[in-house]
Image (cartoon, rainbow, N blue to C red):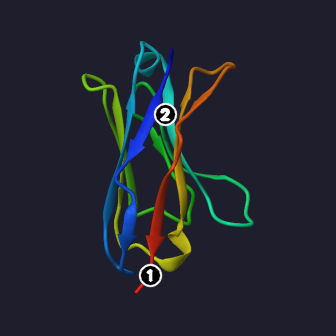
Amino acid sequence: QVQLVESGGGLVQPGGSLRLSCAASGSIFSLSSMGWYRQAPGKERELVASITRGGSTNYPDSVKGRFTISRDNAKNTVYLQMNSLKPEDTAVYYCKADRGYAPYYWGQGTQVTVSS
């Protein structure tokens, strides 16, 4: 049984920082690229960061320079460091494990709220 469990969300003021974690159970982590996605109310889910098995990363322009994804293969955990947070970063953040073929695995999500 594969499980992804996110943690680290919360309420933060604009300009603040948060670090999200996603812990994976099972053997899937080492076989997968990992991604962080977010979904704001009324909007589609969007990719905010991804990291391959080899450590190559990718970010959309909206978060480039502010967010950093990393992975610790020994701990089966992927992280998302978010700095200089903006109100528009408010969303539920999800992690995803992608082996390159279905099924893909998602966590349950963690809420991030950026507000003064």
Where in the figure is residue 83, as x and y percent of width and height? 34, 67
The answer to whether residue 61 is left or right of residue 10 is right
The residue identified by callout 1 is: 115
Q: Residue furthest bottom?
A: 116
The residue carrying pointer 1 sits among few (fewer than 14), some (14 to 19) or many (20 or more) residues within 10 Å by Cα, namely some
Q: Secondary structure at mark 2?
A: strand
Residue 50 visible (yes or no): yes
Residue at horizontal 41 percent and vertical 72 percent from the top: 85
Q: 67 or 9, which is in the foreground?
A: 9
Callout 1 amino acid: Ser
Q: Which residue is mark 2?
A: 34
Which corner quadrant of the image does residue 57 belong to? Answer: top left
Q: Residue at x 48, y 26 (%)?
A: 3
Indicate the quadrant where residue 116 lies: bottom left
Front residue of this view, candidates 75 and 64? 75
Residue 50 lies, in percent from the top left, at 50, 41
Q: Which is more N-terminal, label 2 or label 1?
A: 2
* Pointers 1 and 2 in contact (C-beta within 8 Å): no
Do we see residue 66 in this rendering?
no
Image point 30% across, 24% down: which residue? 73
Q: Is residue 58 above or below residue 92?
A: above
Query: In the rendering, which numbered label is found on residue 31?
Result: none
Horizontally, is 102 left or right of 22 in the view?
Answer: right
